[in-house]
Amino acid sequence: MLQGGVNPDLPFEYYTDLIRDIRKDFPDLTIHAFSPTEIDFMVQLTGWPLKTVLQRLVDAGMSSIPGGGAEVLDDWVRKKVSPKKVDSLGWLQVMEVAHEMGLRTTATMMFGMVDRAEHIVNHLFKVRELQDRTGGFTAFIPWTFQPLNTKLEKLPNNATGVDYLKVLAVSRIVLDNIENIQASWITQGLKLCQTGLYFGANDVGGLLLEENVVTAAGIKAETQQLDTMLKLIHATGRDAAQRDTAYNILRTYPRQS
């Protein structure tokens, strides 16, 4: 998975060369790369149509697209917390065109800033409506805003663990057309992630080699061992399974009775 910021000093070829070099060294690797904000920036950088930019990335070896940068898909919220990122319609357009091209993507939501319940509901229904049209989302991953070391650190509206579990549960109900709802141990911690499996989640994300985004916001996202994650899942009374990015099951780990 590759995603980051936008840099006006980097040409578009930087991104295609990056993917092409990775693909050359690891021909079978799934390259899950570039959020809609980054892809929208590439469109502005090149002046090319969105579909052309996406096709160039696919030709270089990109496999799928992460759903980062969605924050809350309500422009009242986005103008306050991420005014320089692509707007709600632009985020959804990137995903819709990607789905039409056969690319699978995830969808995310980061909440607990200035957003209210109605903004979260708007977000869920926008994702649901797009999924009804395209069927291209493999998973939905909500998490709470991590304020430390950000310009929004002093916002009073930080979501609690209870808020997180409520959003997980409502997401499972509203997004009945998205098969996988992920509980994030990286942002929420192992215990709340485990609890999330009782509130509609069926996925706990992946093990980490390296993480730089939430780490910069003060979250200690340590690499977890497979045994730890198996114990976490088995303790809820469920069998565990290893998946790939497209949610194909690669191996199962039945719970020992």
Image: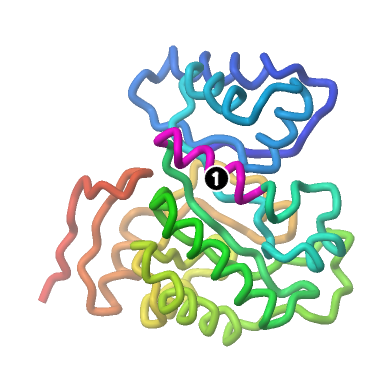
Q: Which residue corresponds to the image point at 65% horizontal and 83% vertical from the top-left?
A: 160
Does the magenta portion include 101? yes
Does the magenta portion include 257? no
Q: Which residue corresponds to the image point at 31% horizontal and 70% vertical from the top-left?
A: 233
Of residues 74 and 84, the one nearer the viewer is: 74
Q: Main secondary structure of the magenta part?
A: helix
Q: Tell me residue 169's x, y (percent).
A: 45, 81
Colour mode of the rendering? rainbow
Q: Which residue corresponds to the image point at 31% horizontal and 58% vertical from the top-left?
A: 227
Outermost front residue: 133
What is the three-letter code of the residue carrying label 1? Met
Q: From the viewer's perspective, is 232 left or right of 170?
A: left
- 232 above or below 219? below
Span shown in magenta: 91-102
Mark 1, residue position: 95
Of residues 136 and 129, the one nearer the viewer is: 129
How packed mark 1 is, by other alpha carbons closer than 10 Å (few <14, some 14-19, many 20 or more), is many
Q: Tell me residue 196's x, y (percent).
A: 44, 77
- 172 above or below 62? below
Q: Tell me which corner region of the image, top left, top right, bottom left or bottom right, holds residue 40.
A: top right
Q: Tell me residue 132's x, y (percent).
A: 42, 59
Q: Work out which quarter of the rendered image holds the C terminus and state it.
A: bottom left
Q: Which residue corresponds to the image point at 67% horizontal and 70% vertical from the top-left?
A: 111
